[in-house]
Image (cartoon, coloured by chain):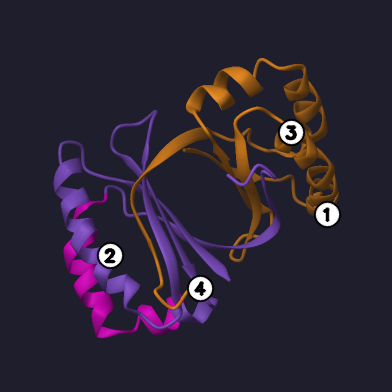
Chain colours: A orange, B purple
Amino acid sequence: MILEHAVLNVVTGRECEFEQAFAEAQLIISSMAGYQSHALMKCHELGNRYLLLVQWASLEDHTIGFRNSPEYEQWKKKLHDFYEPFPEVHHYSTVESASSPMGF
Amino acid sequence: MILEHAVLNVVTGRECEFEQAFAEAQLIISSMAGYQSHALMKCHELGNRYLLLVQWASLEDHTIGFRNSPEYEQWKKKLHDFYEPFPEVHHYSTVESASSPMGF
C-alpha cells in the first residue's frame, strides 16, 4: 500500500464550493484501478486548508495509471482551479503503525 | 475523531536513528488517554521526510491531555532533536471518505 498525500490550500471564500466539487470528483478517483480508500479532511487551525489522503495498491497506480488516464483530466477540471498555490503531492509507505487495543 | 498531522523533516543521515527512536517513543503516545491509532510513514520522493498521523478521540486529548503530561516530556526528549526545521502540527477532521467496495 502507498499513501498519496497532499496539503491543499483552497482560495479563501471558495471552501464550500470546493467541498461540493470534491463530493462529485471523489467518484472519479474511487473508480480507478488500484484505488483503495481516500479521505478529504479539513484543518482546525487554518480555515482554507485541507488534507487529501488516497491509498493506492502501488505507486504506479497513481503516478502512471491515474495521471495518464482520461479520468484524470476530469479530476483536474473539477478541482485544480481551487488551489492556491498548487499543492505538492508526495507518496508515503508505513514504517510503524498501531491502534488502541480498546478497538477504536 | 481528530487527526494530528505533522510532516517531519529529519536531519539528513539520522534517518535510521530516528526510526529506532520512534519505535520506542510510540509506546508513549499509544498509552495516552484518547489515543486511537498512529502511523509513521516514510516519503518516496524525499529521503529524509516522514509523515506522522495520530488519531485522537478529541482535539483536547492531544493539545491539553498529551502536551501537558509528563509523558510528553519523554516524547520530546526522544524525538525533537531529529527535526530540522521543527515541524508544524495541525489537526484535521474528515469531510469526505470512502473505501473500495473490493474490501481493500
Q: Which mark is residue A31?
A: 3
Q: Nearer the viewer, mark 4 or mark 2?
A: 4
> Which residue is found at the position 62% from the left and 19% from the top?
A65
Q: Which residues are magenta?
A: B62-83
Q: Earlier in the sequence, mark 4 or mark 1?
A: 1
4 and 2 marks on the same chain: no
Using the image, determine if residue B70 lies above or below residue B96. Answer: below
Instruction: Point out the tag, 3 or 4, that comes first from the N-terminus.
Output: 3
- Would you name the residue on which mark 1 appears? A16
Q: Is residue A86 left or right of residue A25?
A: left
Q: Provide the secondary structure element on which disc 4 rests.
A: loop
Q: Chain of mark 3?
A: A
Query: For the residue marked with disc 3, what is the amino acid?
Result: Ser
> How far, Cα to Cα, is label 3 from label 4?
28 Å
Left or right side of B16 for A64? right
Disc 3 to disc 4: CB gap under 8 Å: no
Tags 1 and 2 both on a single chain: no
Q: Nearer the viewer, mark 1 or mark 2?
A: 2
Instruction: Give the labeled residue for mark 4.
Output: A104
Q: Is residue B21 above or below residue A31?
A: below
The overriding secondary structure of the stretch rendered in magenta is: helix
Spot occupied by residue B35 in the image (x, y as percentages of width and height): 43, 75
The residue indicated by pointer 2 is B26
- Going from N to C along the chain, the mark reached first, 1 or 3, is 1
Tell me if residue B103 comes above or below residue A25 in the rendering.
Answer: below
3D distance between C-alphas at marks 2 and 3: 35 Å
Q: CA distance from mark 1 to mark 2?
A: 37 Å
